[in-house]
Amino acid sequence: MLGSILPFDEEQVDRVSEYCEKRSLPITDNLADHWEWTRTRFPDADKMSSCLQGSWMIFTARDRKPKRILEIGCFSGYSALAWYEGTKDTKAEIVTLEYSRKMIAASREAFAKYGVEDRIKLVEGPAEKTLPTLTGEFDLIFVDANKDGYANYVKTILDQKLLSPNGIILCDNVFARGLSIGPDCAPWLNDHVRPYWLSCGQALDEFNTNLMKDERVDVLLLPLFDGVTQIRWRDQVKA
Ligand code: SAM
């Protein structure tokens, strides 16, 4: 077997997720409560990251020790809370962008409830407008909002040097449930959500393909979760 991805079937995939979850650093009780609160309160709760992704965020933040984190796409605040947990030692500032009135209210409620407003700053409005107004550098940038905006967001981040010299951009869902790779790649996806993910797949395939041509950066697309792209500044080779 020379490929990178194991051919698990639908039922096995759930078992694999659970297997990994139970053998990874656990999310905190607060995060678990918030995940459950979001799941039961919002019909589109599948926009929220999974519990295993929460563990991945905490691990990644502890490992990289960012001083500033930027997140595009807050939803109910679950990932911002995970970044907060992962940066308890470094006391990183976390800036998260969101435009939905409903999700802004939900996140603000959660941030107040868990007492994390000292380090999490929620910037309200469409990210295409708020992102260009940000200043300074971020060491970890999580791109997780509208999929047809990824190309523009990453371009703005790079053009405005919002990414610190050793920083990393993590773009979530670049597989678009598999549909970036081909319309036949997600036979299990129901007809209700398929048109949405098909259009995301088209936008993300374009993003994934064009990003490779940007000579400023190194790009690594990993078959992790629903596809995660890592982006870093390319090292300058000295003459
Ligand atoms: N990061 C969250 C997590 O891990 O739980 C999930 C984010 S969810 C996938 C995407 C969020 O981006 C939604 O809450 C949506 O309202 C928001 N969003 C979509 N388009 C946006 C835009 N143009 N500007 C700001 N937020 C946007």
Image (spheres, rainbow, N blue to C red):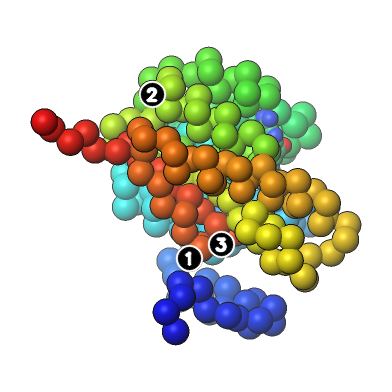
Q: Nearer the viewer, residue 134 or 83?
A: 134
Which of discs 1 and 3 lies nearer the camera? The answer is 3
Q: Which mark is residue 161?
A: 2
Does the CB distance between marks 2 and 3 fall below 8 Å?
no
Q: Answer with the quarter of the image where residue 227 lies.
A: bottom right
Seen as rendered, the residue at the extreme right is 192
The residue positioned 61% from the left and 43% from the top of the image is 206
* Quadrant position of the N terminus in the picture: bottom left
Mark 1 and mark 2: Cα distance apart in space: 34 Å
Tag on residue 26? 1
Q: Residue at x 53, y 46 (%)?
A: 209
**Callout 3: helix, strand or loop?**
loop
Residue at 50% in and 28% down: 155
Kind of residue indicated by mark 1: Pro
Indicate which disc, 1 or 2, sits on the residue closer to the N terminus. 1
SS type, badge 1:
loop
Please give the residue where the numbered disc 3 appears in the rendered image: 225
User: Is there any visible trace of residue 33 in the rendered image?
Assistant: no
Position of residue 60 measured from the top left corner of the image (x, y, whole percent):
39, 53
Please tell me whether mark 2 sits on a helix, a strand or a loop. loop
